[in-house]
Image (cartoon, rainbow, N blue to C red):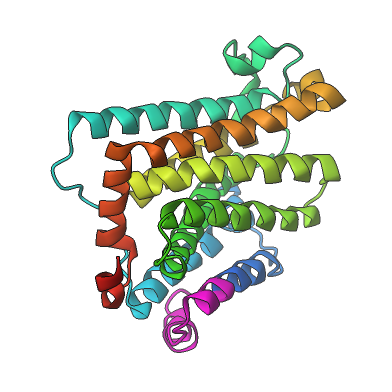
């Protein structure tokens, strides 16, 4: 399947020249892959878990991202080497990583928290057990599903950012616009999760708000570091935590309460936005981002206008 899709990507998607249609085509491909019927197979736990995880779809999209981006004339870097990184660069990247990990823990433990300290710092790690997951019973499916989310969604973010940076190439705040709009697209795609068993309006709204804030954070990390593998790692870690929550880890009063629920949505949305604004307003961090944009995300033919 991966081999057969190469000519399709090259001659159907690769011939799209307008960045707006490149973005639209990418979103359409994601929707199409998500809605593709899953074929049931029989086998051992590993094979069944691999099949149900849709990891193959993630690899298909990673292949699409690489071939489409390079065919369009852009550059694809899995691990961009930063020229002359300073101590400040590594320190700020470490801070971004710590905040991302904290948001991941908060997003998981808020589901079981009845008091704020249980969500913010006093985490009960006994509630995390992939073998006794409340959501996924096949432990291999859980591992593969977390990896699937990391590869698929961060590959999508890469394509979104590249096409949006081209669209906003003449705008002074192109990095801000691109991160915000890519996060909006990323979050709204979670509406598709209505098709999953047990989904309801409250759970989907929480996913949308969290995905927007988390997307802003990962978008900043991607542009700042130029390392796609790093955002994949953070995303995989976040989904692994969420998938590994045991049945006792659900039913926390903070999320279900009407008043505190609003605060929860504010935390998962506003904190990443504040970090985004701080980074893009800081002269040193913005300089790294602008350098990476010019090296990685911008079409070589329009280099003269940036």
State the residue in front, 70 or 274.
274
Answer with the quarter of the image where residue 298 lies: bottom left
Q: Residue furthest front?
A: 172
Q: Residue at x 69, y 23 (%)?
A: 110
Magenta stretch encompasses residue 102: no
Q: Residue furthest left?
A: 84
Q: Residue at x 77, y 29 (%)?
A: 262
Mark count: 0
**Place of residue 53 in the rendered image (x, y in percent of width and height, measured from the top left):** 60, 53
Q: Residue at x 64, y 51 (%)?
A: 187
- Quarter holding the C terminus is bottom left
* Placement of 31 over or under 255, stated as above or below: below
Magenta stretch: give its range.
1-25
**Place of residue 190 in the rendered image (x, y in percent of width and height, measured from the top left):** 69, 53
Side of 206 relative to 28 (left or right): right
* Placement of 221 over or under 47, stated as above or below: above
**Place of residue 278 in the rendered image (x, y in percent of width and height, measured from the top left):** 43, 34
**Place of residue 15 in the rendered image (x, y in percent of width and height, measured from the top left):** 44, 87
Magenta stretch encompasses residue 6: yes
Side of 90 relative to 158 (left or right): left
Q: Residue at x 61, y 33 (%)?
A: 270
* Placement of 175 over or under 3, stated as above or below: above
* Placement of 148 over or under 31, stated as above or below: above
């Amino acid at each position: 399947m991966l081999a057969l899709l190469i000519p399709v990507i090259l001659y159907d998607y690769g011939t799209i020249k307008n960045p707006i249609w490149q973005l639209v085509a990418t979103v359409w491909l994601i929707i199409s892959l998500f809605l593709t019927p899953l074929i049931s197979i029989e086998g051992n736990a590993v094979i069944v878990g691999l099949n149900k995880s849709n990891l193959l779809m993630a690899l298909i999209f990673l292949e699409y991202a690489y071939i489409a981006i390079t065919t369009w004339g852009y550059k694809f870097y899995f691990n961009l080497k930063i020229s002359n990184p300073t101590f400040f660069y590594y320190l700020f990247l470490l801070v971004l990583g710590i905040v991302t990990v904290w948001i991941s823990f908060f997003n998981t433990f808020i589901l079981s928290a009845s008091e704020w300290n249980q969500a913010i710092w006093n985490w009960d790690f006994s509630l995390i057990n992939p073998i006794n997951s409340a959501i996924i019973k096949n432990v291999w499916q859980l591992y593969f599903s977390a990896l699937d989310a990391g590869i698929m969604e961060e590959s999508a973010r890469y394509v979104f950012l590249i096409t949006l940076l081209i669209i906003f190439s003449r705008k002074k705040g192109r990095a801000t616009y691109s991160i915000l709009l890519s996060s909006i697209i990323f979050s709204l795609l979670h509406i598709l999760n209505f098709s999953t068993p047990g989904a309801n309006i409250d759970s989907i709204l929480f996913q949308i708000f969290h995905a927007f804030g988390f997307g802003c954070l990962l978008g900043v990390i991607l542009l700042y570091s130029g390392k796609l593998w790093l955002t994949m790692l953070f995303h995989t870690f976040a989904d692994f935590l969420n998938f590994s929550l045991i049945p006792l880890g659900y039913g926390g009063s903070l999320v279900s309460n009407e008043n505190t629920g609003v605060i929860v949505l504010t935390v998962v949305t506003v904190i990443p936005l504040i970090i985004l604004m701080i980074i893009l307003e800081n002269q040193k961090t913005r300089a790294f981002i602008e350098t990476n944009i010019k090296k990685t995300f911008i079409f070589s033919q329009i280099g003269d206008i940036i």
